[in-house]
Amino acid sequence: MSKQTLTEKAEVSGSREELVRRFLEETPDYFLNHPELLAALVLPHPESGRAVSLVERQVRVLRDRSERLARELGELLGIARDNDQLSERVQRFALAMIDADSLDDALDTGQDMLRQEFSLDGVVLRLSGNPRPVLPRAEFVAVDDAVLAGMQNHIGSRGGQTVCGPLSDTGLLNSIFGAGAAEIGSTALVPLTRRGLNGVLALGSREPGRFRPDMGTVYLQRLGDLLLCGVARHLINER
């Protein structure tokens, strides 16, 4: 009979260990019925290397697991608290948009609240498609506005959804935030479309990690939709 290769022996050993593991999982009271085997077990301490009892090793495993679960629970609670606070800010923002009694009030209140409630260092709104014959504010621009087109092209090149992260195009960054562009470390560009209005809400932060490419954008899109809804309501009413 030919000798087994090292690979074959390893595979046999691995399969045996798997069988033993499954057997012990399915028979947790095995050592109760065979206490003599406990004396033959060797369980070195993971740090000191000295031999410890099975009970001591089990206690350590359970303690480590408990500590890990406690850390995970703490992280989940922290996330839940942050989400609750964020939801409250979004609700206050929505109520402010509902209470705004004019177009100027909706624009001013919306941008001020975004800065204050969400600690943003730059808030820029650019819209086209205003149905009124006179453009009332700097936020409303012509269809061929270069800054708006640049933001929309940047969003379109990345799938057409909200884009977050540092804006490497310094020319576009300067055109959006003007004199304050040098302080902006990360941005979020939120596409806006409603009732003939098209535009982009640009949010900027000094913190490079505030807006990241891998972050969720659901709340950002909701904020943009709420702001645009408040603005569009007054445009339609005042036509």
Image (tube, rainbow, N blue to C red):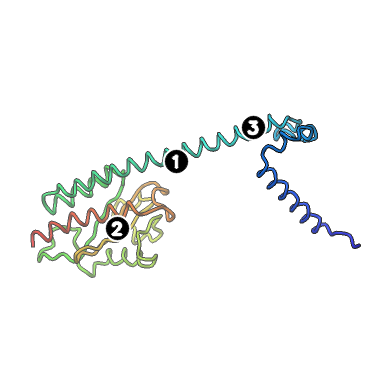
Q: Residues within 10 Å of mark 1 (few under 14, many from 20)?
A: few
- Residue drawn at x 18%, y 61% is 140
Q: Residues within 10 Å of mark 3 (few under 14, many from 20)?
A: some
Q: Secondary structure at mark 2?
A: helix
The residue lying furthest to the bottom in this view is 144
Q: Quadrant of the C terminus?
A: bottom left
Three-letter amino acid code of the residue under disc 3: Arg
Q: Secondary structure at mark 3?
A: helix
133 or 59, which is in the foreground?
59
Q: Estimate the x, y position of residue 15 in percent, counting from the top left.
A: 74, 53
Please tell me whether mark 1 or mark 2 is closer to you in this view: 1
Residue 35 image label: none
Residue 60 image label: 3
Q: Estimate the x, y position of residue 217 in percent, counting from the top left.
A: 36, 54
- Residue drawn at x 33%, y 67% is 153
- Residue drawn at x 37%, y 41% is 82
Please tell me whether mark 2 or mark 3 is closer to you in this view: 3
The residue lying furthest to the front in this view is 33
Q: Estimate the x, y position of residue 72 in percent, counting from the top left.
A: 50, 39
Disc 2 versus disc 3: distance between alpha carbons? 57 Å
128 or 193, which is in the foreground?
193
* Quadrant of residue 200 within the rendered picture: bottom left
User: Mark 3 and mark 1 in contact (Cβ < 8 Å)?
Assistant: no
- Residue drawn at x 36%, y 47% is 206
Three-letter amino acid code of the residue under disc 2: Ile
Q: Mark 1 — residue?
A: 76
Q: Residues within 10 Å of mark 2 (few under 14, many from 20)?
A: many
